[in-house]
Image (cartoon, grey):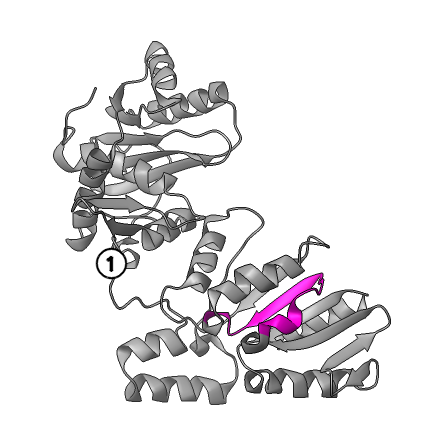
Amino acid sequence: MMSGAIALAAAAMGNRVAWVAPTYKQSRPLWRWAERTAATVGVVSRSERTITFGEGFVGVYSADNADSMRGESFHLAIVDEASRVNEDVWTDVIQPTLADFAGDAILISTPKGRNWFWREWARGQTGAGMCASFTAPTSDNPNPNIKHAAQLAKEQVSERTYRQEWLAEFVDDGGGVFRHVRQAVRAQPQDKAIEGHTYVGGLDWALSVDSTVFTVVDATTKDVAFIDRFNGVEYAMQRQRIKAVAERFNVRTIIAEENAMGKPNNDELRRMGVRVRDFTTTNATKSDLIEVLASAFEHGAIGLYEFAPLIAELEAFESERLPSGGVRYAAPQGMHDDTVMSLALAWHGAAQGRPLISFG
């Protein structure tokens, strides 16, 4: 209903709008509602399934006949039940139709595992680019009949089905690298050091494409105390911000990546009086970091506070078995792992009281 209203309003303002459903039949509820709503103000073509408002229009399309959209140009595309649409329809057909007008897309759907729709949703949680994402369970619907149906479903369907279809949760049969992430969200952010507590920092450097992330872990409680994340900030300003946080928490040591721009920045921090230890990232050392952090989540040893970019990156993080038999850990294509790496570096020191592997 919300997206249908947006579609008609955008078309009435002269925009070209595509409504895409997985199949022709699945577009019928929207079409019936739109036809009834706009019958007196727009020109309805049932054969073309379009509603025209002067220069603007809403056209209804099915993803199983995606070629009908090729060559079109839209200001807005709304993809209904997007998780049921093939990824190549989204990347190869729908996205190009938005290029001419630098158009927008709204993806709405019940989840279906951790497919491309989930990756787009997770990207929106990180705030990457001009993207935002939202979720709500059916039980939040104010309609009392729907609330009652949700309660009945909880008693009658499997837990997995209930979580996916009624709670709008992305359920992964296989499980990701980090499990029980949501259960770890039990801490509160701290403004400054608590007397008698020890703090360790993890620092992942970046400038423009990725984000620099500085995570402070309370080694006494094993909770994340503070996260500073910034993008597009000059290194001199970054170092000042890191120094200020380190002093506020009296951070015992910062374990900081030294690859690329890391080494000169670490050297400068040391000259500023900040206690920094270098960490060289290779596939082997990264694997050690990630596996120790994953174990912390498995055993409920680590506590997080609600920080959407970190939670999205943790839940998206992937592993790949290499031909050599080793494992490569990384973020999915199009996403980043800055907050994960910063947390992993901080957890190194906090979990053991000292680095778990040798540093340069």
Q: Which residues are magenta?
A: 66-83
Assign the C terminus to one quadrant of the image: top left
Q: Residues within 10 Å of mark 1 (few under 14, many from 20)?
A: some
Residue 206, percent from left and from top: 43, 30
Residue 48, percent from left and from top: 73, 82
Q: Is residue 324 above or below residue 163?
A: above
Residue 169, percent from left and from top: 37, 68
Q: Residue at x 71, y 68 (%)?
A: 17
Image quadrant of residue 65? bottom right
Residue 341, percent from left and from top: 31, 38
Q: Residue at x 51, y 59 (%)?
A: 133
- The residue most toward the right is 54
Image quadrant of residue 198? top left
Q: Is residue 75 above or below residue 233?
A: below
174 lies left or right of 243: left
Q: Does residue 352 show up magenta in the picture?
A: no
Assign the N terminus to one quadrant of the image: bottom right
Q: Could you tell me the amino acid type at mark 1?
A: His
Mark 1: secondary structure: loop
Q: Nearer the viewer, residue 88 or 250?
A: 88
Q: Is residue 88 above or below residue 345?
A: below
118 lies left or right of 181: right
270 lies left or right of 94: left
Q: Does residue 73 show up magenta in the picture?
A: yes
Q: Residue at x 84, y 81 (%)?
A: 41
Residue 246: tell me if it is visible. yes
For mark 1, what is the residue? 180
